[in-house]
Image (cartoon, rainbow, N blue to C red):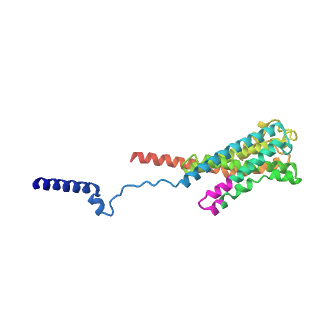
Amino acid sequence: MPSGKSSQESLWQEASQQSVAQEAPPASIADDPNAPRPEIIVPPPAGKNHRGLVTGVLNLLVLVVSVILIVWISLDTFKKIDFLNSRPYMTFQLWVCVFFITDFFVGLYYADDRWRFFRHRFIFLLLSIPYLNIINQLDITLSPDAIYFIRFIPLARGALALAIVIGYLSSNAVTSLFMSYLVIMLLVAYFCSLIFFQREHGVNPQVNTYWTALWWSAMNMSTVGCNVEPVTVAGKIVAVILPVSGMIIFPLFTVYLTNYVTDLVQKGHNRRH
């Protein structure tokens, strides 16, 4: 019997030594400090997920209200509606501006570097102020041309947001910048064509339809020029804005094409080697 008991104890000792050996790390990992360690994946903090969700929803809503505002102003322009006396439009624009201001301060709250965010996005806050509603409530008298330009300030805020979000669709920095500026160029040309048509139609015999104003805007944006001459103050101001914008934006086409061709050549070189 003692011999059986001792054999059982020896079996238990061997089993315990094997389990300890299995749990212990390999000697190569334990002894070598430079040996690769298993990668530990740390999930992102819950606060960052919440911040991404909130900012993503706000960006989507900014795009939606910006598109609605653009469509509304376009329809009012074509129908010759006096927007200052249109209560639905003034109310909608007020709430759009309030939403833009809310979006700015929510972004400021979630920003890692709030001072940097404030400096880089301060223009967004200025463009979000409901100037038309303030002018209307205080009964400030301005020229029709000035009032019409002020009407497009919230649209500029929406256009910037649209350009930024579309730029996020590309992971390449040059492509992202190109897409953003392309959106800005198209929106500037469109807004200027609306202003030119609204102020010149009925005054300038050369502007018979909106398509004439759109053609004039595109030709001036491309710095080619057009045989249609503006006769109003607003038309002349737009005639200066368009070619200046074109001279700033069109060189980006060269940068983008150069980067694109360079990437293609580099990929072909890597495949051959």
In the image: residue 215, left or right of residue 108: right
Residue 107 belongs to magenta span = yes
Q: Can residue 163 be seen in this snapshot?
A: yes
Q: How many marks?
A: 0
Q: Is residue 139 above or below residue 66?
A: below
Residue 30: image x %, image y %? 30, 61
Residue 143: image x %, image y %? 88, 51
Residue 114 belongs to magenta span = yes
In the image: residue 21, left or right of residue 53: left
Q: Which residues are magenta?
A: 103-117
The residue nearer to you, when weighing 183 against 257, is 183
The residue nearer to you, when weighing 255 against 71, is 71
Residue 188: image x %, image y %? 72, 46
Q: Can residue 242 be seen in this snapshot?
A: no
Q: What type of secondary structure mainly makes up the magenta span?
A: helix
Which residue is rendered at x = 76% and y = 40% of the image?
72
Which residue is rendered at x = 79% and y = 48% of the image?
151
The residue nearer to you, when weighing 76 against 43, is 43
Q: Is residue 191 above or below residue 13?
A: above
Residue 164: image x %, image y %? 63, 49
Which residue is rendered at x = 64% and y = 58% of the image?
109
In the image: residue 153, left or right of residue 42: right
